[in-house]
Amino acid sequence: MVLEQTWRWYGKADPISLDEIKQTGATGIVSALHHIPNGEIWPVSEIIEHKRIIEDAGLIWSVVESVPVHEDIKKKKGNYSIYLDNYKQTIRNLGEAGVYTICYNFMPVLDWSRTSLKHKCKDGTFALVFKPEVFAAFDLFILKRDGAEKEYSRQLILDAKEYYKNISAYDKQELIKTILQGLPGSEESFSLDSFKAVLKDYEGIDSNTLKSNLFYFLNEIIPVAEEVKIRMAIHPDDPPRSLFGLPRVVSTINDIKEITDSINSISNGITLCTGSFGAGNFNDVVKITKTFAHRINFAHLRDVSNDESGFFMEENMFEGSVDMYGVMRELILEEKKRIVNGRSDWQIPMRPDHGHLMLDDIFKEKTNPGYSLIGRMKGLAELRGLEIGINKSLNYE
């Protein structure tokens, strides 16, 4: 009995091939139809063709990550009802094609955000990092968002000024690119002007409104997911705090409780992302795992270090702030419970989430930030070994 070992693949444009992924030991693929614009229906024919490509390589398409939720749905404005109907049809089409787990998020405008995609670590590898003073410098002095200064402490503003005073023109452009132009899996990319425009469109939408819109969305889609036996898995906010004044409503244990309580259904589940939850020092990731184990439909496993300032960095496995042993143990215990209870969906798909850029990957012409080959293969091997050890110890208890 093992967690299903999966690997994120970005399709034919991914610099890592399916043949290489197979050599890592992963058996499942986490993928999406990235070429289809947000809000449009995924045709059955294209889903089946993507699935065929994966299966021809001797793998299975285990999880869709992601079916993007259109911004109009999140705002409940404009053409939201059309996009909602399209989303329901995509769920039906995925069920018809035999892909039964969908990861998605409800983060406004931006999903995951970092201030550097190539922070050099002490061991010579490179990691993704979020520094609050750098983010504040972008918001205050590059984007120049109206009212931004009200959202930062006096000390953070002083630190941001000091940082901005010393950066080069090149560093400034790299920061703009890092924050606005899209990371792997991001739904949109922006210029400074277009970003200001979409932020303005969220004026008047606070956390209560966004949460209400999320519950409306869930009440519409979960019955459809139940019909076609699909497990939805909402991804937590990354990082788990407001950015650019935008509300975030999937950041804490209380948020997850409200979401799962809103519809009591296995189809209304979560993606346990230890890195996203772990980026907030206020989150006890093991407690979240244990409390909502029965609703975990997918797992992203990585370690991060964090502090009270909002800083976080993606660490080597077992060297950060997340108790990876405790998380893995709870996932294994949950699988055992599911088998005893006769759940057909007993197996939890997990993937190594992000990895350090290291060894030969450092010199490759193209790698997706966080999604290089060797760093993630190292993470998968470590997770596999941890799982085997815990399983053996549980058998002796």
Image: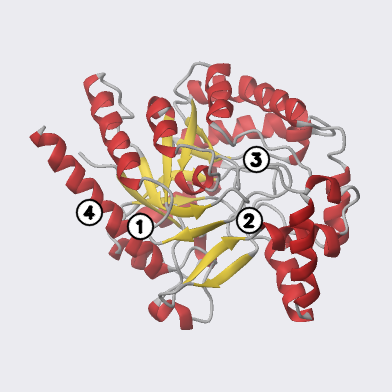
Q: Which of these two is toward me, 21 or 301?
A: 301
Q: Are marks 1 and 2 in contact (CB under 8 Å)?
A: no
Name the colouring of the figure: secondary structure
The residue lying at 36 percent from left, 45 percent from top is 323
Residue 251 seen: yes
Q: Mark 2 = which residue? A: 35
Q: Mark 1 = which residue? A: 56
Q: Are marks 3 and 1 in contact (CB under 8 Å)?
A: no
**Quarter placement of the N terminus:** top left
Q: Dot 4: what SS?
A: helix
- Cα separation, mark 1 vs mark 2, equals 21 Å
Q: Dot 3: what SS?
A: loop
Q: Mark 3 = which residue? A: 41
What's the amino acid at mark 2?
His
Instruction: Determine crowd level at label 2: few under 14, some 14-19, many 20+ residues with C-alpha closer than 10 A.
Output: few
Q: Which of these two is toward me, 183 or 207?
A: 207
Q: Mark 4 = which residue? A: 385
What's the amino acid at mark 4?
Gly
From the viewer's perspective, tell me whether residue 142 is left or right of residue 17: right
**Quarter placement of the C terminus:** top left
